[in-house]
Amino acid sequence: MSDWKHRHIIDLATFSLKDYESVLELAHRFEEIPSTGKRKLPALQGRLVTTLFFEPSTRTRSSFELAAKNLSADVQSFSPSSSSLNKGETPLDTALTYVAMGSDVLIVRHRSTTVPEQLAKALDLTGKKTAVLNGGDGLHSHPSQGLLDLYTLAQHFQPEKPTPNALKGRNITIVGDILHSRVARSNLWALTASGADVTLCGPPSLLPEEFESFVKAPPPGQKNDPIKKRGKIKVLRNLSEGLRDADAVMALRLQRERMSQNLITDINQYHQEFGITHERLKVCKKNVVVLHPGPVNRGIEISSNLLDDNSISLVEKQVRNGISIRMALLYLITAN
Ligand code: NCD
């Protein structure tokens, strides 16, 4: 893993194929560790990992904390509602307070797109060694979720060797509120880098046409795309067309807290048109699987029966894989 170059992890747009391979390979190794009976690895002994979540979270925060503990790190968490944010302290100053206490890694979630990146820049400018891991910023990026989704799919297609190559030529359909989804954006970078073709499906108010060219220009801030050949992206409005021949379907939550206008007028109508059910999956490939990053609105973006059908739903696996993927990320960014 000596060729790992990322001090911070803000966005998957900057990831090379080797980066994806390194993360998945390490996660695969970490996943096998609990079965040996040795729960903790000493890799991060003496390191302090802080979870700075300015937005709510269940899975991401808890699994980062568990991942850090599995690597023997000390873990510190922060609760915005009882913090000095209420006295007017800025998120950046809050983060720098934790740096001053000796934090080696800050995992940051914020509703504004710029916060994790600004923090990483501020740390680099002052020569501080603390690493920043983006735990989800606004609509922009959620790298650990994109990676755990990639891993979950690779593991499904190729259980013995879950590498990005397992996704080559696969059809993955992402359905729902793409506009507000940082998960969709991170998945678009990760899935197309692995050679999968992605179909995006949703109503125009939640899926602008521009998404078709999402990965076409060089990624933001870069001269060239680190990936030579990406899979294709297409936008379809009709669910039956969007699901045709899909190898995997990812449903996304309607993020009503981020909708400034009422973009969906009738939830029942939305479920009729875009809700994923057993019936609607009939046009997909025979062994199709379903993912959802959570939290789920049962009966809206996905039917309750389908969500709980573990012969098709990989949702529990996504949650479990979140731990080993986050162990891999923590390991890699603290290794240098
Ligand atoms: C997602 C998020 O916060 O972006 N959740 C998660 O991290 N698993 C998706 C969502 O909130 O719908």
Image: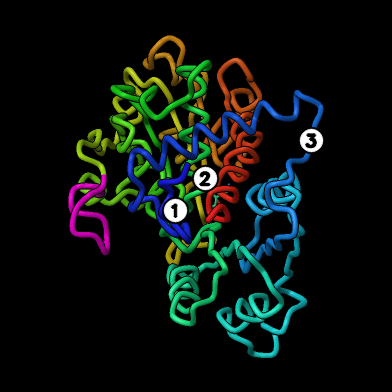
Residue 258 percent coordinates (x, y): 49, 62
Residue wearing tag 3: 39
Is the residue at mark 2 in contact range of ligand 1, meaning its CB lies under 8 Å from it? yes
Is the residue at mark 1 in contact range of ligand 1, meaning its CB lies under 8 Å from it? yes
The image quarter in which residue 49 lies: bottom right
The amino acid marked with disc number 3 is Arg
Tell which circle, 1 or 3, labels the residue nearer the N-terminal end: 3
The amino acid marked with disc number 1 is Arg
Q: Residue at the location (64% across, 76% down)?
A: 99
Q: Is residue 178 visible?
A: no
Q: Residue at the location (54% across, 33% down)?
A: 302
Q: Is residue 140 magenta?
A: no
Magenta-highlighted residues = 214-226
Residue wearing tag 1: 182
Q: Is residue 16 visible?
A: yes
Tell which circle, 1 or 2, labels the residue nearer the N-terminal end: 2
Residue wearing tag 2: 145
Q: Residue at the location (69% across, 90% down)?
A: 87
